[in-house]
Image (cartoon, helix red, strand yellow):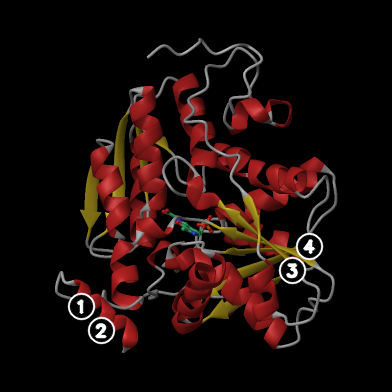
């Protein structure tokens, strides 16, 4: 089979740094480490809008970040963090992670030829994230502690040794992640939505989106952050020592970008709210069953928060535009899906059995 060479005018998506270079601190000469991340679809969700705000005329859109190369939004920030690590001559990178940052760091480090260490909380990382981190060849270190413990460890080791830290305390991560805001504005035809809804864990993403909207200068949304009720330090205003939630991606008790997130929420006239695991699961089911969009549980937290705030009358949905960031793909966490979405029907391999099932 013969393929023609790519032309300069090829419409190939170059990844977020190249696509938005004039808004980012990377000059033309910098070699970019990319997996062509970004350019994720903004999916119109009219049936879901009707389900959560009947008759309101709410225009609801889903930013499906699970379609990034490693299955989560982390790739936007990781292309920037790894590009910068290479620029600075790093040979090893490290992060603490609930799983998605780990998989993303591992992939981009592999592409750059760097060693990658990831610290993950033992037994609290979804299978797809563990599988990917191992497959990309990272040193996966499972600690008998939480994400917060891991973050403390990686912060300390990078002060002692010449290892680059690629958690979102690294400002380059935010530089990359803010491109999500640029894309949303572009996809909405040049204007920010009224509401921007997303889960909040370590609080890097909400901080990055706010930077992005402000820099792009095409209107500002109000931010709606959702935290899991068992891991809601920002809502409670205090560190949660033993965070618990089935949304393991956001099982975080002491977010690194806490202050910046609160500033962003305040500046935007936003809301941060806690949602129960049951509400997260209900939102997770609604996304899959009403719109055909499968996400990992944590990623449904933005919808759970919006649904709660509309139901409580805190958000008036009438004729508003809302974007919900769906941060990670459903296949990241197949275990929760199999446990919570019902069992397959077992039948003998006979047509009569299928007929009987259908007439039941
Ligand atoms: N959604 C998913 C799927 C995540 O993996 C994370 C964070 C968040 C939301 C929250 O984003 O931390 O910027 O507020 N995951 C990190 C990780 C902590 O290690 O993968 P945040």
Q: Which type of secondary structure does the marked residue at label 1 adopt?
A: helix
Residue 268 numbered mark, or none:
4
- Direction from residue 14 to residue 154 in the image, left or right: left
Mark 4 and mark 2: Cα distance apart in space? 57 Å
Q: Residues within 10 Å of mark 3 (few under 14, many from 20)?
A: some
Q: Quadrant location of the N terminus?
A: top left
Q: Nearer the viewer, residue 265 or 7?
A: 7
- Is the residue marked 3 within 8 Å of ligand 1, measured from its CB? no
- Measure the C-alpha gap from mark 4 to mark 1: 60 Å
The residue under label 3 is 270
Label 3 close to label 4 by CB (< 8 Å): yes
Where is residue 233 drawn, in percent x and y? 52, 73
Q: Earlier in the sequence, mark 4 or mark 1?
A: 4
Callout 4: SS:
helix
Q: Quadrant of residue 263?
A: bottom right
- Does 103 sit above or below residue 28? below
Residue position for label 1:
352
Residue position for label 2: 356
Disc with the residue nearer the chain's start (2 vs 3): 3
Circle 1 or circle 3, nearest the eye? 1
Of residue 134 and residue 4, the one placed in the foreground of this image is 4
Q: Given contact means CB atoms under 8 Å apart, are the residues at marks 2 and 1 in contact?
A: yes
Q: CA distance from mark 2 to mark 3?
A: 54 Å
Identify the mark nearer the N-term, 1 or 3. 3
């Amino acid at each position: 089979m013969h393929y023609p060479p790519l032309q300069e005018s090829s419409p190939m998506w170059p990844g977020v740094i190249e696509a938005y270079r004039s808004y980012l601190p990377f000059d033309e000469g910098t070699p970019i480490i990319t997996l062509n991340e970004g350019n994720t679809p903004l999916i119109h969700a009219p049936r879901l809008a009707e389900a959560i705000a009947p008759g309101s005329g709410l225009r609801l859109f889903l930013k499906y970040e699970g379609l990034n190369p490693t299955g989560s939004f982390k790739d936007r920030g990781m292309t920037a963090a790894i590009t910068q690590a290479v620029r600075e001559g790093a040979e090893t990178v490290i992060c603490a992670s609930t799983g998605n940052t780990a998989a993303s760091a591992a992939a981009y480090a592999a592409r750059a030829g760097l060693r990658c260490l990831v610290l993950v909380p033992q037994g609290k990382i979804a299978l797809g994230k563990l599988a990917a981190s191992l497959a990309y060849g990272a040193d996966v270190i499972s600690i008998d502690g939480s994400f917060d413990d891991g973050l403390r460890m990686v912060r300390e080791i990078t002060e002692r040794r010449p290892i680059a830290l690629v958690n979102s305390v690294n400002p380059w991560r935010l530089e990359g992640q803010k491109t999500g805001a640029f894309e949303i504005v572009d996809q909405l035809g040049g204007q920010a939505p009224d509401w921007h809804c997303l889960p909040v864990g370590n609080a890097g993403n909400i901080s990055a989106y706010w930077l992005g909207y402000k820099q792009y200068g095409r209107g500002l949304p109000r931010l709606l952050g959702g935290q899991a009720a068992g891991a809601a330090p920002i809502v409670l205003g205090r560190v949660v020592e033993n965070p618990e939630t089935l949304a393991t991606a956001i099982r975080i008790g002491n977010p690194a970008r806490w202050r910046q997130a609160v500033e962003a929420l305040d500046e935007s006239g936003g809301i941060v709210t806690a949602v129960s695991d049951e509400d997260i699961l209900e939102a997770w089911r609604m996304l899959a069953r009403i719109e055909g969009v499968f996400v990992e549980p944590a990623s449904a937290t933005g919808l759970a928060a919006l649904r709660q705030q509309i139901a409580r009358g805190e958000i008036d949905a009438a004729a508003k535009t809302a974007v919900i960031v769906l941060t990670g793909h459903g296949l990241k966490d197949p275990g929760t899906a199999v446990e919570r979405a019902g069992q397959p029907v077992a039948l003998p391999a006979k047509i009569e059995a299928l007929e009987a099932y259908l007439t039941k």
